[in-house]
Image (tube, rainbow, N blue to C red):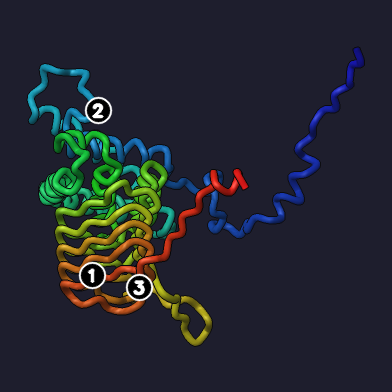
Amino acid sequence: MKICKEQSFDASEYVQTFLGTFDRISGTANFHGMKLLPQMLIIGEIANDLMELMFPGRCGHDKPSESLEEILARQLDKFCSQLKTQILLAYKYENPDMDECLLVEKTDQNLRQLCLLLPSIRLALKQDAQAGFDGDPAARTVGEVILSYPCIKTLTIHRVAHELFRMGIPLIPRMFNEYAHKETGIDIHPGAEIGPSFFIDHGTGTVIGETSVIGKNVKLYQGVTLGALSFPKDACGMLVRGTKRHPTLEDNVTIYSNATILGDITVGENAVIGSNVWIKENVPPDTMVVLQEPKITFRDLKSKKRQ
């Protein structure tokens, strides 16, 4: 048996060339070794703590003798302490020259504001779970929807991320929603405004853009896209940001699988959008939009073989 002599690997031979790809101006290198950043792994842990905070018992309890009040106090403290660290890191990253005490104070204000909003967020999530049960005959109980439906996990994370986004917190809201996207296949930008009693059946491949506005009691199926029709640019050729460029869905709208709704248009109240349509203009209230019925041809393969 032939024995091959292994050559030692010397990484230093390649470091200089690779180093040349980095912007090494002081204070501008965008990687963990130069500047502390929030971490997706920790964001995922916080998201799971949030799920347990909103729906105690979802992940089980190691202290069954605790009262509900004790469970909520412990879970809220855990959630807030980890979230505070990540928000502060995000602020430091975006404002490296700002006084750290001011950033700590700003972070504390954000957390207090979020805690005041948590009751209303949970009430909205209860309506979302009920909408999931009411809208899916396969669901046996509301508890089953909460425990296992990807829509509820996504909306729990999104509704908190949206409030952080509105507060102007950098990085964290998008990291939350990208974690939810990875977990569920549902991609919702934290800027999207979503009313109560919202349900995404199945959910895989659903995309909801930043400036989308969704009313109450709206139902989407898998693969629906609420996207931008185009990306306007300024006189210098740079993308214009902050403009309304995604659809508005009014109350009681239903959109079936793989429909694509593009641009700053409005789908009116009670409208129904059929599968696979491509819409770029307003849809009036109480309107159904469907593709023309395709012609289907059946062939008898057995008779063809006999010939």
The location of residue 1, given as percent across then percent down, is: 90, 12
Name the outermost residue toward the top.
1
Q: Nearer the viewer, residue 107 or 52?
A: 52
**Label 3 neighbour load within 10 Å: few <14, some 14-19, many 20+:** some
Q: CA distance from mark 3 to mark 2?
A: 41 Å
The location of residue 288, given as percent across then percent down, is: 23, 70
The location of residue 39, given as percent across then percent down, is: 43, 42
**Label 2 neighbour load within 10 Å: few <14, some 14-19, many 20+:** few
Name the outermost residue toward the right.
2
Tell me the kind of residue under disc 3.
Answer: Ile
Residue at the image point whose x is 34% and y is 56% from the top: 257
Of helix, strand and loop, which one carries label 1?
strand
The residue where tag 1 is placed is: 288
The location of residue 177, given as percent across then percent down, is: 35, 50
**Label 1 neighbour load within 10 Å: few <14, some 14-19, many 20+:** some
The residue where tag 2 is placed is: 59
The label nearer to you, 2 versus 1, is: 1
Quarter residue 71 falls in: top left
- Residue 278 appears left or right of 20: left
Residue at the image point whose x is 38% and y is 41% from the top: 183
The residue where tag 3 is placed is: 279
Q: Nearer the viewer, residue 144 or 89?
A: 144
Vertical placement of residue 119 versus 251, above or below: above
Vertical placement of residue 108 versus 148, above or below: below
The label nearer to you, 3 versus 2, is: 3
Residue at the image point whose x is 30% and y is 36% from the top: 48
